[in-house]
Amino acid sequence: MSEVPFVKVEAIGNDFPLIHETDTLGDLPALAIAMSDRHFGVGGDGLLTVKQENDAVRLRMFNPDGTEDFCGNGIRCAARYVRDLGWVGDEFTLLHLNRVVPVRVTGSLISTEIGRASYRAEDVPTAAIGELFNSTIWSGMDAGMPISLFGSALTTGSTHVVIPTISLPDSATFASVSAKIEVDPQYPQRTSVIWTQEVASNELKIRIWERGVGETQGCGTGSSAAVADYFRRKNRGGEVFVENPGGTVRIQMDRWDAPITITGQARIVYSGKFIAAKGSPS
């Protein structure tokens, strides 16, 4: 048996075991599957790994199915951890997938600049010719009835379909339709699905289906995608508060295609050791 030290972290209900990445860990996707399991592992919406890299910190995030992804809430969780550990000061840089993320810690609040939104088919990616903006993003059957949904497909570091609604869907519709959209061939690397409701000017409420996870309590890149699409449809920028099921984040951008800043909290919940079979994380 081998032991893997971890801390459990969360941001607006998006929870993860976080570990230090070392050469001895072996198969990280398999370890993510084992540790994320809510019955036989630690439980979480994925696995975060951190390591020091020159003057920055390298962050990786693996979904519960082992796929590697970009994660806005994971960035804040990792930022809180490495700041409290003393690796960095109040302003530093995280390297996450193909993005360089400036971070600022101000008391309990953490602000991160995660890059820009893109609707380009090759960036999202989608199998469509050209952008999917304010158009039909999925057609199919649900509960024996044909459905066509209007929305947008974009990336804010991770792939999202954003569906603006007058009111958020009931749980049965949400789960059934979101699961179908996630694996639709139009989205070759699968997609998360963000259902959005404008509850007031500059205030959105969302419900989140994350690819490789299912329904989650929070999503930083999904909140950002919802706001980028909101601003593009309204042809402006500014600041929007996004109510996730697990809490609220503030998203700022000068216009929809400007750099995105996410501000919110993150905390360390507890620490422990995950016991894995020797030579295998499961």
Image (spheres, rainbow, N blue to C red):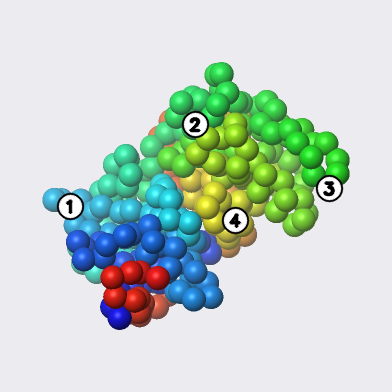
Q: Name the image quarter holding the N terminus.
A: bottom left
Task: Tell me residue 47's x, y (percent).
Answer: 40, 62
Task: Tell me residue 27's x, y (percent).
Answer: 31, 60
Q: Assign a secondary structure to mark 4.
A: strand
Which residue is at 67% across, 44% downward?
A: 180
Residue 172 located left or right of residue 270: right
Q: Residue furthest front?
A: 279
Which residue in the protein does label 3 denote? Answer: 143
Residue 89 located left or right of residue 117: left
Q: Verify CB contact (< 8 Å) between mark 4 and mark 2.
A: no
Q: Is residue 148 above or below residue 178?
A: above
Which label sits on residue 53?
Answer: 1
Question: Which sits in the foreground, 152 or 12?
Answer: 152
Instruction: Identify the amino acid type marked 2.
Output: Pro
Q: Verify CB contact (< 8 Å) between mark 3 and mark 1.
A: no
Q: Assign a secondary structure to mark 1.
A: strand
Q: Assign a secondary structure to mark 3.
A: loop
Tell which circle, 2 or 1, labels the residue nearer the N-terminal end: 1
Viewer-side label of 2, 1: 2
Tell which circle, 4 or 3, labels the residue nearer the N-terminal end: 3
Which residue in the protein does label 4 denote? Answer: 214
Which label sits on residue 125?
Answer: 2
Q: Residues within 10 Å of mark 1 (few under 14, many from 20)?
A: few
Residue 265 located left or right of residue 195: left
Report, in whole angstroms, how far the alpha carbon at label 4 lies from the one at label 2.
20 Å
